[in-house]
Amino acid sequence: MHATADREPARRLMLRSFCVVSGALALAVAAIGFAPGHALYAGDALEAVAPVASAPVGLATAALVLAAIGVSVWRRPLLANALLWSVISICLAVFMLAFTAGPHFYRDGRPVDLPATALENQLLLALMIVQLVLLPVACTVFALATRAPRPEPIARARVHRIGQTGR
C-alpha cells in the first residue's frame, strides 16, 4: 500500500491534527498569560497581583505567531512545512519561556504563585512537547512508513563485441 493516493489523506489528517492541537495550546497559553498569576505580599498584606506572564503582550505575540505558522501548515500540509514549523517553534519557545518568568525577586516581599501560573506552565510544557518532540517524530515515522520501496536492481548487461573472434 504505497500508492500516493492512499497516503495523502493520512498525511493531511496527521499534520492538520497537529495544527489543531498546537494552535489550541498556543491560544490557551496566550489567553492565560493575562490572568492573575502571582500575588505579591509585603509582610502579611497583599500588595499587588501580577499577571501570569511578565510580558503578557509579548507572550501573546509569540503564541499567535506560532498559531499563524500552524495555519500556513494547515493550508499546505507538507512534511517539510511541519518540520520547519517545529524548528521555528524552538526559537519561539525561548521567548515564550522568558515571557512567562514570574516576579521571583520582589523588592520588599514574597511572590506567591496562583493556580493560573501552574496551568500556564503545564500548557506551555505540553505545547513544547507537541512541537519539539511529537511533531518531528510523527513526521519521521510517517515518512519512513510511507516511503516507496526500492526498485529491484537491474542485472548487469552482457556486452558482446561484434567482429571479435574468440581467443
Image: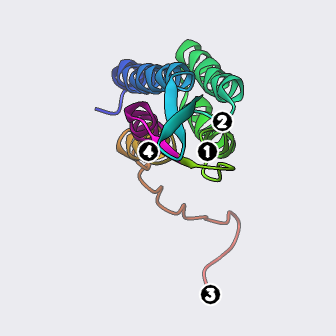
Q: Earlier in the sequence, mark 4 or mark 1?
A: 1
Q: Earlier in the sequence, mark 3 or mark 1?
A: 1
Q: Earlier in the sequence, mark 2 or mark 1?
A: 2
Can you say which quadrant of the picture contains the N terminus? top left
* Of marks 4 and 1, the one in the foreground: 1
| Residue with the mark numbered 4 | 129
Q: Is residue 115 within the magenta segment?
A: yes
**Residue 61 at x, y percent in the picture:** 69, 23
Q: Is residue 2 within the magenta segment?
A: no
Kind of residue indicated by mark 1: Ala
| Residue with the mark numbered 2 | 54
Kind of residue indicated by mark 2: Ser
Question: Which region of the structure is painted magenta?
Answer: 111-126
Q: Image quadrant of residue 53?
A: top right
Kind of element beneath mark 4: helix
Is residue 147 at all visible to an observer of this figure?
Answer: no
Kind of element beneath mark 2: loop
* Of marks 2 and 3, the one in the foreground: 2
| Residue with the mark numbered 3 | 167
Kind of residue indicated by mark 4: Ile
The answer to which of 38 and 158 lies nearer the viewer is: 38
